[in-house]
Amino acid sequence: MSKFIYFFFIILFIYSFNNVFANECESKKEYKKSEDCYWLKRVVGIRTPVMIASGTLIDNNFIITNRHVAEDHPHVMVRFFNGEIRKAYPLPNNYPVDLTILSLNKTLIPKKINFPISSKPPLKLKVVGFDQGRKKSRIYKQGKVIHFPDLNKFPFSRIHTNAQSLPGNSGGAVIDERFEIIGFLASGDGNYNEVVPIQTVTNVIQKTDINVKEEFIYWGRNIRICADTLEFSYKFQKKPPQNLIKKIEKFCSLSKNKQLFDQVGQTFGRWGLFDKSILFLKKSLNLDPYSPNTLLSLAISFHIKRDIKSEEPIIVKLLNLIPEDPQVLRLGIQVAGYLKNKKLGKNVLKLMKTHNPAAHPLAKNYLKNAFK
């Protein structure tokens, strides 16, 4: 991207926020509590040459955002709640989670940052992110925790929730019902969102080191090329050229990014390349074995491939995680009927009666015929 276009975006970015002031928070009826205002003021907007995202102030000089936001850019533009615009610089780290620390002062390092970590797993979550439509930070509708990870067993796994979020919220703070921060939004599909736990920040800080700068830039470059290639791949409705497939496999494998692994799996599945789809989705599950988005994509790939036996344990896992999901219930009925698994069929019908009663009679009739 040319310097002219980049500076044009920066000017547009600054101009679009010129009517927002710090005292707006207390004047809004929807943000009556001081805790709400606290987090609204901690979340910032981030502009890179290719996207708008969010970040969270964890110190006066340091901001947390996603690794996939920073990519290999030497700096990003940050817009604070009071309208101030400043540059921030990604600090090199080699810890393989989707987080990086931005410094507002190149000479500072984040080794002595202390931040509170909640000792109790949350039940409800809210995303605080930069809202592109409102052109400022916003607190979104609360949702429940679908799965809270065991970081001792799976250190790169995420918190999963159905709390509302929108594009541009990546890197925003995720807070619980006690207004304590529990992590940073990483990705989502509109239904199920993924949060990098705040405990991971300690590892990111420890692994922040100028000596890993080349590795850090190389990693960011692979993330950028993978994301750009996947975006380009949407031009192909059918099987694409072999060189495009190889490029996706190479750079997305090197991205070390769970979200991109999921997108690759979905892309290959859309093209009917199910073995490649399953391979990348399993890469994602190795990092985070309780991800509803990944499990659902994997179940669909197995289903279309007609490998129903392999699909069965995935469906069982999904029924425990998101029993209210209509697509999971529908797949569960089909798997039970195909494999003549009466125990599974009975369980799915029970869940369907609770969560999707309108579909229950048809599903019951389908299984009755399948079990004959």
Image (spheres, grey):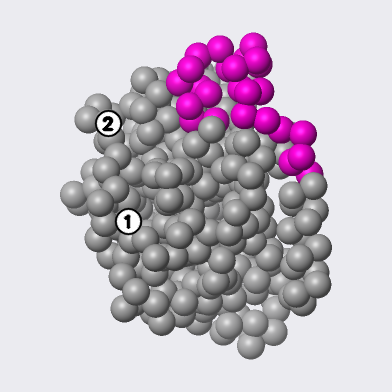
Outermost residue on the left side: it is 152
Q: Quadrant of residue 270?
A: bottom right
| Tag 2: amino acid | Ser
Residue 202 visible in rendering? yes
**Are circles 1 and 2 on residues that touch, CB within 8 Å?**
no
Q: Is residue 48 magenta?
A: no
In this rendering, position of residue 163 left or right of residue 157: right
The spot of residue 127 in percent (x, y) is 52, 33
At a point 32% along the width and 51% down the height, the residue shown is 201
Residue 365 coordinates in the image, percent (x, y): 57, 27
Q: Which residue is mark 2?
A: 118
**The residue stretch that appears in magenta:** 16-40
Residue 297 badge = none
Describe residue 352's horizontal placement relative to residue 59 as left or right.
right
Q: Amino acid at mark 1?
A: Pro
Categorize mark 1 by other alpha carbons within 10 Å: few (<14), some (14-19), many (20+). Answer: some
Whether 284 is drawn above or below 317: the answer is below
Is residue 278 or residue 112 the one in the foreground?
112
Residue 32 is covered by the magenta coloring: yes
Dot 2 falls on a residue whose secondary structure is loop
Q: Which residue is mark 1?
A: 110
Mark 1 vs mark 2, CA separation in Å: 21 Å
Identified at 45% across, 21% down, the residue is 35
Q: Position of residue 241 (x, y in %)?
A: 69, 84
Q: Quadrant of the N terminus?
A: bottom right
The one of 282 and 336 positioned closer to us in this rendering: 282
On screen, residue 16 versus residue 30, left or right, reads right
In the rendered image, the residue lying farthest to the bottom is: 243
